[in-house]
Amino acid sequence: MEAEVDKLELMFQKADSDLDYIQYRLEYEIKTNHPDSAGEKNPVTLLKELSAIKSRYQTLHARFEPAAVEQKETKRRICATVNKTINMIQKLQRQTDLEVMLSVDSHH
């Protein structure tokens, strides 16, 4: 489960980086190829829309982060409980084996 959370985190980071690069490239292309562009859709409007998309992505990431932290903590607690249970079972097995051996020795 932790590997999946880490993978999602990396995907979010890559998407954020990709958005930064796309915005940079758009700004560069607009300045270079269309300095006085009079197109139907203003390039500045496009950049603002891209900024809004990035903002929504960051909001989503902020909502995801606490869930990821909670998932890691839950996994840690589950592993600790399983380890305690295994140790308890092993201890009980050793005690039972010792009791069986003592019982067998006392009957001879």
Image: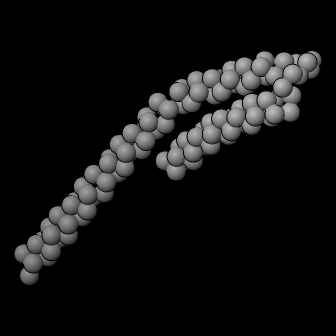
Left or right, 11 with reference to 108: right
User: Is residue 43 in view from this perspective?
Assistant: yes
Q: Residue at x 62, y 36 (%)?
A: 16
Q: How many numbered marks have been drawn onto this rendered protein structure? A: 0
Can you tell which quarter of the image residue 27 is in? top right
Front one among 7 and 79: 7
| Residue 93 place in picture, x, y as percent | 24, 64
Above or below, 68 against 97 in this view is: above
Which scheme is used to colour this image of the protein? one colour
Q: Residue at x 77, y 19 (%)?
A: 44
Above or below, 79 against 60 in this view is: below
Which quadrant would the C terminus be assigned to in this image? Answer: bottom left
Left or right, 101 with reference to 72: left
| Residue 51 place in picture, x, y as percent | 68, 23
Front one among 4 and 33: 33
Above or below, 65 against 52 in this view is: below
| Residue 77 place in picture, x, y as percent | 35, 42
Q: Residue at x 53, y 27 (%)?
A: 62
